[in-house]
Amino acid sequence: QKEVEQNSGPLSVPEGAIASLNCTYSDRGSQSFFWYRQYSGKSPELIMSIYSNGDKEDGRFTAQLNKASQYVSLLIRDSQPSDSATYLCAVNTGNQFYFGTGTSLTVIP
Amino acid sequence: DAGVTQSPTHLIKTRGQQVTLRCSPISGHKSVSWYQQVLGQGPQFIFQYYEKEERGRGNFPDRFSARQFPNYSSELNVNALLLGDSALYLCASSLWLGGNGYTFGSGTRLTVV
């Protein structure tokens, strides 16, 4: 079992719709959780962090964490073509930092 | 402010050679971590350093080693290069042990021929 799992996609949504990205993790001792965006040929860029159960909103982005279910999600509201990228879920277990394989998102104008 | 800087940008090495990659963290950041990313995959954790001490190691062979210097810059060394070591090597820095997320450099593209 991989430490962090994501659906690889591709996920396509029309412009203005809500994109929903999901991630599960295996280590119950994981302490902090992150979503990164990676454009093709570029390095990952941190967009959201979440540390406690519940929702955290930042602009058009909402991260959701459910530690009991070992589940993290990212919602992107009013999706824009510029949101087209690969979204990486990352989990910090204390001395290791694991990434999922990423979900490719395409926003169709 | 300068972000995380990595050098070189691109590198071509022959199988069996050794390579050293360099990373300078964001000013004030004391934690550096290294990742290997192959095409189509997420970054794979190699090492994490904090205050010049190794604080985490991923599932990589002993051919991979790293260190962090007193100015918090870091080097990643890979010995006895294999074709499978061809990848993008990413360095990232954080104020402390990754708890607030890492900021990535642009990476070093290593090609082993």
Image (tube, coloured by chain):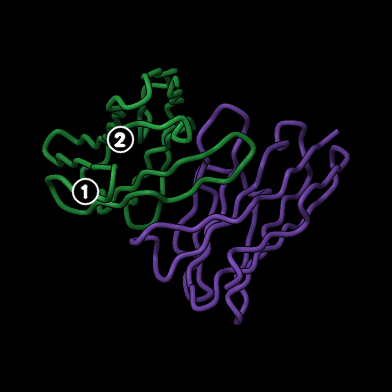
Chain colours: A green, B purple
Spatial separation of the CA atoms under disc 1 and disc 2: 10 Å
Q: Which residue is mark 2?
A: A76
Rendered location of residue A31, percent (x, y): 25, 53
Query: Is B78 drawn above or below residue A79 in the view shown?
Result: below
Q: Amino acid at mark 1?
A: Glu
Which part of the image, by quadrant, shows the N terminus of chain A?
Answer: top left
- B13 sits left or right of B105 in the view: right
Query: Is B60 drawn above or below residue A71 in the view shown?
Result: below
Q: Chain of mark 1?
A: A
Query: Is A98 drawn above or below residue B1 in the view shown?
Result: above
Please name the residue shown 52% across and 41% down the image. Answer: B44
- A31 sits left or right of A46 in the view: left
Rendered location of residue A100, percent (x, y): 41, 34
Q: Which residue is mark 1?
A: A57
Query: Is A83 drawn above or below residue A53 in the view shown?
Result: above
- Label 2 residue SS: strand
Residue in front for this viewpoint, B103 or B70: B103
Choose top left, top right, bottom left or bottom right for residue B86.
Answer: top right
Work out whether mark 1 precedes mark 2 in sequence or the reverse, and give the earlier one: 1
Rendered location of residue A98, percent (x, y): 41, 43
Please name the residue shown 44% across and 18% down the image. Answer: A10
Which part of the image, by quadrant, shows the C terminus of chain A?
Answer: top left
Rendered location of residue A7, percent (x, y): 37, 22
Q: Amino acid at mark 2?
A: Ile
- B41 sits left or right of B102 in the view: right
- Label 1 residue SS: strand
Residue in front for this viewpoint, A45 or A83: A83
Please name the residue shown 44% across and 19% down the image. Answer: A108
